[in-house]
Image: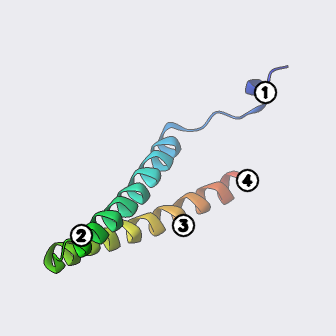
Amino acid sequence: MRVRDLVEPVEEHDADLVTMLQSVLEHSWRMDAYAREADRAGDAELAGWLRRIRDDSARAGDQGKVLLAHRLDQDGG
């Protein structure tokens, strides 16, 4: 028996959730890096705007983590 046979298939919408969660968390990380670069360049206005974007992405990431955890608990995962 192959390991592949032991793993239950992942529903497509759950895979989409994982993909989008990864994407939004990476986006938050990138915005933080860009904000630090703007700080180093002395551009406080740009840095503030990038941090607001970062914060929005981080909130979305937190919501996605909660949603994923809830779905995993429901599925017994």
Question: On residue 50, which mark appears?
Answer: 2
Dot 3: what SS? helix
Q: Which mark is first along the chain, 1 or 3?
A: 1
Instruction: Give the vertical position of 37 relative to 3 (above or below).
Output: below
Query: Which one is in front in this view, the residue at disc 4 or the one at disc 2?
Result: 2
For residue 11, side relative to residue 51 (left or right): right
Q: Which mark is first along the chain, 1 or 4?
A: 1
Q: Which mark is first along the chain, 2 or 3?
A: 2
**Residue occupied by mark 1:** 3
Task: Give the alpha-carbon distance from disc 4 to disc 2, as whole Å.
Answer: 38 Å
**Residue occupied by mark 3:** 66
Query: Which one is in front in this view, the residue at disc 3 or the one at disc 2?
Result: 2
Q: Which mark is first along the chain, 1 or 2?
A: 1
**Residue occupied by mark 4:** 76
Q: Nearer the viewer, residue 58 or 64?
A: 58
Horizontal and vertical percent for residue 77? Answer: 71, 51
Task: Give the alpha-carbon distance from disc 4 to disc 1, as whole Å.
Answer: 19 Å
Please name the amino acid that badge 1 sits on: Val
Q: Nearer the viewer, residue 75 or 64?
A: 64
Query: Which one is in front in this view, the residue at disc 2 or the one at disc 1?
Result: 2
Please name the amino acid that badge 2 sits on: Leu
Q: Nearer the viewer, residue 56 or 63?
A: 56
Residue plotted at (68% across, 51% down): 75
Please name the amino acid that badge 4 sits on: Gly
Q: Which mark is first along the chain, 2 or 4?
A: 2
Extreme residue in the top direction? 1
Q: Are marks 4 and 1 in contact (CB under 8 Å)?
A: no
Alpha-carbon neighbours of circle 4 within 10 Å: few (<14), some, or many (≥20)? few
